[in-house]
Every structure is written in structure tokens, then in C-alpha cells.
Image (tube, helix red, strand yellow):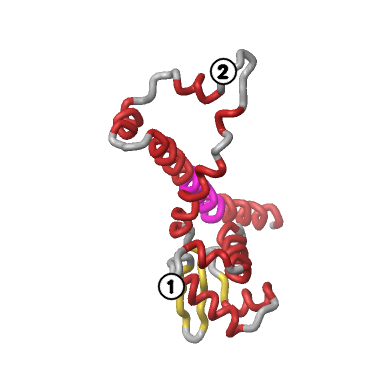
Amino acid sequence: MADIFDVVADATRRDLLQVLLTRYVSPDSERGEISVGEIVEKLGLSQPTVSKHLKVLRDHGLVTVREEGQHRYYCIDTSPLEDLEDWLIPFLSADFDTDKDASGSTVFAAWSGMPLPEPIRRAAETLQHPSEAGTAIGRAAAAATHRIQGASHEVERRVVDPLKLRLTKNSDK
């Protein structure tokens, strides 16, 4: 079975993921779902081609599908991309400590001289390699940020947007 790298290596599947992500974050989309027909229209591909690639994405957990009669509605699930993120992080942060401050010491060294909060220190001590601590903390921070952004999007969609709509309707009367 192909791994996540093989799945996203295909340009058509990356295009599909982009369409799904755009729909997911759209304030106009109640569930973040999109129909196969809409994907076909947006990408200009044949329905069998889109369905074939959606099956690969579904088999690897990158999309969920909701069936409604003969229609299929797809939604992105980014959690399988964590393996890809884990692999990329060391490459993206390789030059993290090359930025020097005015005294010539690294920004990272200045930060690391501060005492770590107890839970983070305990977690770091359980890891074999110090770099794992940074990766674990970075992933946790990214996951928390993603959840906060998702919650913010949901509040906007479920509370703020309906209030705006209601206020607009009331002001038109």
C-alpha cells in the first residue's frame, strides 16, 4: 500500500486536496463538504478521474465521504498529513538557530536559558533525543493552533454570521 508521500506526490490529488481545503475553510460552507460534481467542474477533469483519485484519498484517510442518495459529499481530513509534517519539520527548521541577536548569541540559546515549565521539562526528559522534545512541542502547538482556528471558524460560521444576517434583515425592515 502506498504511503502518504506517494498519495500527495500526484499533482491531481494535490489539486483535489486544495479544492477540498478551500471548501473546508470557506465561511459559505456549512459542513465543509463538496460534491463530486462540483469538484469535476472546478478542476475540469472527468468524473471517473476525480472518483479514482478521491478513492485513493479516502483509502488513506485524507477525506471523509457522506452519502445522500446517489450523491457523494467529500470533506478533507488533514490528520494523516501529520506523518508528512513530522518528516518536513526538521528540514524547515534546520536553520532555526542561525539568526544572531546583537550580542552574537543565538536567539534559540537565549530562549533555552530560561527555565522550562515543569510539564514540558518532564516530557523532554522521557525522550531519547532532545530534538524529539522540540518536535513534540511544535506539533502540540501546531495542533492547538489548528483547533483554535477551527473553533474560531465554527464560532464565526455558527454564531457571528447568523447574527450578522439577522441584524441585516432587521435593519432592512
What is the three-letter code of the residue carrying label 1?
Asp
Residue 123 lies left or right of residue 136; in this view the side is: left
Q: Mark 1 Cα within 10 Å, few/some/many (few <14, many 20+)?
A: some
Is residue 111 inside the magenta stretch? no
On the image, numbered disc 2 is attached to which residue?
105
Q: Are marks 1 and 2 in contact (CB under 8 Å)?
A: no
Mark 1 vs 2, N-terminal side: 1
In the depicted structure, whether residue 149 falls above or below residue 56: above
Residue segment shown in magenta: 145-159
Is residue 150 inside the magenta stretch? yes
Main SS, magenta region, reads helix
Q: Which mark is residue 59?
A: 1
Q: Residue at x 47, y 63 (%)?
A: 4
Q: In the figure, residue 123 lies in which quadrant?
A: top left
The N terminus lies in quadrant = bottom left
The C terminus lies in quadrant = bottom right
Residue 109, image x, y percentages: 50, 21
Q: Residue at x 45, y 53 (%)?
A: 82
What is the three-letter code of the residue carrying label 2?
Ser
Number of numbered callouts drawn: 2
Q: Nearer the viewer, residue 95 or 33?
A: 95
Residue 169, image x, y percentages: 66, 57
Residue 155, image x, y percentages: 51, 50
